[in-house]
Amino acid sequence: MGTPLPRDPIADARLNWERHGWADVAAPMAAITAIMRTQQILLGRIEAVLKPFGLTFARYELLALLSFARSGALPMNKASALLQVHPTSVTNAVDRLENAELVVRSPHPTDGRTTLIELTAEGRALAKQATAVLNSEVFGRSGFADQDVDQLIRILGTFRRNAGDFSD
Amino acid sequence: MGTPLPRDPIADARLNWERHGWADVAAPMAAITAIMRTQQILLGRIEAVLKPFGLTFARYELLALLSFARSGALPMNKASALLQVHPTSVTNAVDRLENAELVVRSPHPTDGRTTLIELTAEGRALAKQATAVLNSEVFGRSGFADQDVDQLIRILGTFRRNAGDFSD
DNA sequence: GCAATATACTAGGACATCCAAGGGTTTGGA
DNA sequence: TCCAAACCCTTGGATGTCCTAGTATATTGC
């Protein structure tokens, strides 16, 4: 990333929107653009923390999900649904995690179509270590004020529900 | 994506964090995860709208940036800084936009190291059309309440400044 | 003036995401 | 019972992002 810019590029974009007669959507445009950029910053921090573990965020999320499953195993399609990513992305992640011997694929006992992803002891241990560092280095220093964290959870929770993520 | 889940997976993750003794960082974890997911949803909407134009979000952003430049041209490194992406990502986007004849590369008049990206008439027209549809279909129906848009801009603006995006 | 350093862009590679298609397994209705 | 429709996973391809190196051009400092 380099040096900070002298001006906020998103604020500038908003001004441009207003100047071009799109003032009615300038604010949501700025908010959405800010979300995109914030995600990029956060992902960068997370990936930097996970790199020493040989993990990416996608792979970490899968390990973490498995570590919370009672049996330490989940069907691929279940993982895809819970992580909200395309099934092929799960295939990709599992391929790499299996190569690293952090998970194993096993056949579903009753449904021949389904493949279970199972955490190995090594995978469980690594997930635990990575979570500890992520907690202290990223989530524990998010840079968001406590009340802003609550606001984000509320605002984005409503958004996600309206977008059809869950019906809760 | 498919059907809505019966429960909010991020709320579940937060409960898991609390149950495992990480209650102190459970809320920021949930907020950050929600930002990641929200970005994914928004990006999906944007890409769907841009697809008929033969554009991706990355290419659209570059076209839009150029269309706001006085001369309709910018050095590659300037575009990289303003869009906050790696220089190679700009190279990639310009390659494709140039193939589509929406921009052209031209040498910088005084600095031989620098390449200018210049909008073609076609590129300018397409950017205008794409922006109109994006405004009406995405930014105009963001699903965020007006006061929440303001909150997001404030919260994420502070975050980005603290992260070193700008010094404004 | 010239060498050392800094800056700009690109080539190649690793990853992740999605889509479209294909092959195997189950389910359900005729 | 049996075949069509539904479901699950994987392969192959297109994009985007970043990193590391390498080439070319400017700037700096001696």
Image (cartoon, coloured by chain):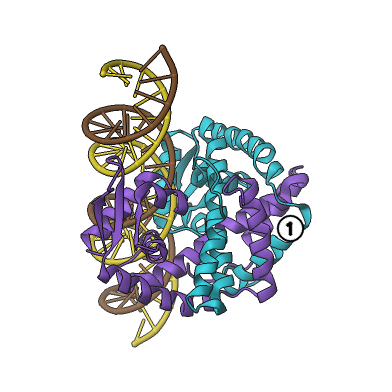
Chain colours: A purple, B cyan, C brown, D yellow
Q: Secondary structure at mark 1?
A: helix
Neighbours of disc 1 within 10 Å: few (<14), some (14-19), many (20+): some
In depth, the one of B14 and B110 nearer the eye is B14
Residue at horizontal 32 percent and vertical 70 percent from the top: A124
Q: Position of residue A52 (x, y in %)?
A: 32, 74
Q: Is residue C4 above or below residue A18?
A: below
Q: Quadrant of the C terminus of chain B?
A: bottom right
State whether residue B40 is above or below residue B132: below
Q: In front here: D30 or A31?
A: A31
Q: Residue at x 59, y 71 (%)?
A: B27
Task: Tell me the chain of label 1.
Answer: B
Q: Position of residue A45 (x, y in %)?
A: 46, 70
- Kindly identify the amino acid type of the residue bearing the numbered disc 1: Asp
The number of callouts visible is 1
Q: Where is residue B46, by image quadrant?
A: top right
Q: Position of residue A115 (x, y in %)?
A: 29, 48
**Is residue D26 rendered to the left or right of residue A33?**
left
Left or right of B100: which side holds A111?
A: left
Residue B4 visible (yes or no) = yes
Residue drawn at x 45%, y 54% as measured from the top left: A83
Residue at 52%, 44% in the rendered image? B57
Q: Is residue A12 above or below residue B32?
A: above
Q: Which sits in the foreground, B112 or A21?
A: A21
Residue B148 lies, in percent from the top left, at 73, 58
In the rendered image, the vertical position of residue A85 relative to residue B100, given as above or below: below
| Residue labelled with disc 1 | B148
Q: Is residue B83 visible?
A: no
